[in-house]
Structure formats: C-alpha cells, structure tokens
C-alpha cells in the first residue's frame, strides 16, 4: 500500500528540510503560476488529442467513401468512430478547464489534483494496452474466419490504441516532471520520484 504523498511528505519534512515553515509552504504567487502552467499543459495535451481525433474523423470518412474493399471500409469506419470519441473527450476536458479557479488552489489541493491527473493517465495507458490486445484479437479472428471487415476493425484499433498509448505515456512523463516541481516546492530538498517522495 502506498502512503499518501502528503503524509509521507509530513514524515520526511523534518529530516530533509529546514524547520522554516515558509520553505514548506510555497508563496501563493508561485503556487498560482504552477497551477496555471498545469492547466496549460493539460490544454496543450487536449489540443493534440483533439487534432488527432479530428484528423481520424476526416481520414476515416473520406477513406470510407473512396473504397469498396471490406477491409478498408472496416478500417476507415473504426478510425472515424475512434476519432469522434477522441474529439469528444478532448472537447469535454477543454470545456472543463478553469485556469482562474486552479490558480486559487492551495498546496494540498494542488497536489491532490496533480496526483489525480497522473493516475488518470496511467489508468488510460493500461486501457490502451487493452485496446492493442483487442485490435490484435480482432485482426487474428478476422483472418481466421475470413472476415475482412473484422481485419480492418482490428487494424484500425491497433493504430488508434498505439497512438493513445504513446500519447498517454508522453503526457504522463510531462505531468510527472511538472508535478515534481510542485513536490519539491512543498518539501524542498526532497527527491521527487513521480508521485511519491
């Protein structure tokens, strides 16, 4: 069982940081800037995801209309469908971002929000591995049952799942790097290890 970072931070703080409370409580301006940067990092990630989703919808719709081959029709149909989902998720996330209220978060809330984002991205990466397995299974099943449309579905899911896995892991790495700055701000001198001290 992992200890909550705030609890672990409280335990480690006397050993690794001076007793000056000003050092373990970042200045509100520094914390506000950090939270604003976190929102902007999320916004940039959602623009990438939304761009991928929009490109997938367009490519899938155009490709579907240009072919009569069942495998390619399946590929393009699945690509457009996944693009719509990606576009919707990016849009909902962007709609929910509120840089002004994020800038007002205190240290505990900032850390909780950072950890929530990191956990979501790791969970998503796990889902992406599942998507890859599903795509491989559909492709193999389509070959085994001579179902060209299933082959196309499987291939499209592999492409979409591969992109999402790379996207989620890259965004996770950026979020951890950003989060480490907060963890070090809260407990100066600590060694940040991406989510725990």
Image: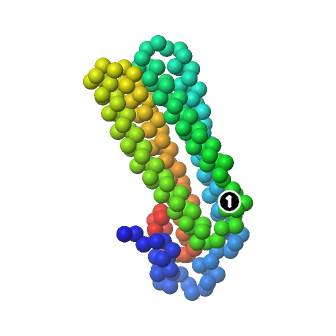
Left or right: 136 as drawn, with respect to 56: left
Q: Report the front residue among 3 and 182.
A: 3
> Eyeballing the image, is 2 above or below 63?
below
Decide: few, some or many residues near mark 1? Use Cα within 10 Å; few <14, some 14-19, many ≥20: some
Q: Is residue 141 left or right of residue 47?
A: left
Q: Taking the image as drawn, is residue 177 in sight?
A: no
Q: Nearer the viewer, residue 27 or 142?
A: 142
Question: Relative to 36, does residue 146 appear above or below in the rendering?
Answer: above
Q: Residue at x 53, y 29 (%)?
A: 80
Query: Pointer 1: what residue?
Result: 36
Counting from the top left corner in percent of width and height, residue 197 is at 46, 71
| Applied colour scheme | rainbow
- Residue 123 picture location, percent across and down: 44, 52
> For the view shown, which residue lies furthest in the left direction?
144
The image position of residue 89, as x and y in percent, is: 57, 43
Q: Is residue 10 left or right of residue 152?
A: right
The spot of residue 102 in percent (x, y) is 67, 62
Q: Which quadrant does the N terminus fall into?
A: bottom left
For the point 55% across and 70% down, the residue is: 184
Q: Residue furthest bottom?
A: 19
Tag 1's secondary structure?
Answer: helix
Q: Is residue 98 at least partly visible in the picture?
A: yes
Counting labels gives 1
Name which residue lies at 34% across and 28% down: 139
Q: Nearer the viewer, residue 3 or 16?
A: 3
The residue located at (54%, 34%) in the rendering is: 83
């Amino acid at each position: 069982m992992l200890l909550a970072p705030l609890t672990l931070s409280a335990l480690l703080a006397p050993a690794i940081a001076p007793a000056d409370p000003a050092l373990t409580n970042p200045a509100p301006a520094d914390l506000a800037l950090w939270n604003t940067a976190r929102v902007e990092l999320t916004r940039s990630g959602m623009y990438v995801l939304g761009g991928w989703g929009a490109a997938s919808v367009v490519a899938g719709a155009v490709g579907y209309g240009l072919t009569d081959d069942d495998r390619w029709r399946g590929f393009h149909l699945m690509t457009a469908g996944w693009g719509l989902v990606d576009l919707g998720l990016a849009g909902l996330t962007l709609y929910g971002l509120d840089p002004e209220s994020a800038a007002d978060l205190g240290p505990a809330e900032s850390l909780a929000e950072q950890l929530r984002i990191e956990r979501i991205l790791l969970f998503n990466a796990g889902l992406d591995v599942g998507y890859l397995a599903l795509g491989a299974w559909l492709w193999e099943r389509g070959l085994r049952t001579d179902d060209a449309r299933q082959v196309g579905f499987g291939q499209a899911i592999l492409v979409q799942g591969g992109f999402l896995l790379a996207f989620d892991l890259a965004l996770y790495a950026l979020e951890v790097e950003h989060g480490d700055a907060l963890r070090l701000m809260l407990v100066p001198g600590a060694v940040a290890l991406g989510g725990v001290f």
